[in-house]
Image: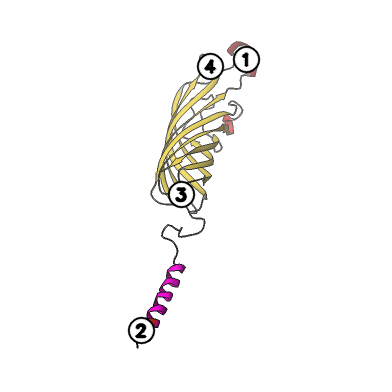
Amino acid sequence: MKKGIALGLCLMGLTGGAARAQDPPSDAPTRVGRVDWKGPYFLLGLGVEGYTGKLAPNINPGPSYGVFVGYRANDYLGVELGYSGGVSGLSVADHASFFGTPDIVRNGGQAALTVGFTPTRLQPYVLGGIGFERYSVREGNFFRFFNDTGGYAPVGVGVRYKFNPNLTAEVRGSYSFLFGQDFAPTQSLGAGDGRYSGLLMIGGSY
């Protein structure tokens, strides 16, 4: 009788040990390739921007830069506030000897909603928002362009990559629909008048 009880206890111990060996560790990821995008983040970016439509012949592409902070409520949906700026040379070839090389400096702020498509380490996303900006002409008062403040609506696509829980990098392309262009000689907006931008950004999430 005692031998039977001992044998039964031994079998139960072996069965329980095998079951525990098959259980995943408590810190194992729930899905292969999935990462956590939830939480606050910040980004610093450098790139290039230019203008389209009637603005393109008058304003040359130039460097662009930005700083963005945001918060993702989950792996997909986020909101962000950002500062962006750029410097673009003005096309004044016919008047270069008189005006020098004037340029227009843009400084703006925006709020945007971002939507990611996957919860994976490499995540594509889209964004849309609204902002305002200030245009300042340097090298004196160039008669064809003026200091001005206006609004715009940015839309864009991008892809972000998480190297580790804190370090991320992004490539983002966006197009801004301008509410007005009183800074330029052509003040009537056309269907294709706007600004494009491409940024390479690096930052952190927490």
Q: Residue furthest bottom?
A: 1
Query: Which is more N-terminal, label 1 or label 4?
Result: 1
Q: Earlier in the sequence, mark 3 or mark 1?
A: 1
Q: Nearer the viewer, mark 4 or mark 2?
A: 2
Reading the chain from its start, which is encountered first: label 4 or label 3?
3
The magenta-colored residue range is 7-23
Question: How many angstroms separate mark 4 from mark 1 (CA)?
Answer: 13 Å
Q: Earlier in the sequence, mark 3 or mark 2?
A: 2
Q: In front of the other: label 4 or label 3?
A: 3
Query: Which kind of residue does numbered mark 1 sit on?
Result: Ala
Which residue lies under the disc numbered 4? 143
Report the disc number at residue 5: 2
Percent coordinates x, y for residue 163 in the rendering: 52, 45
Judge from the rendering whether residue 46 lies leftward or rightward of residue 13; answer left or right.
right
Identify residue type, mark 4: Phe
For marks 3 and 2, give the CA distance.
61 Å
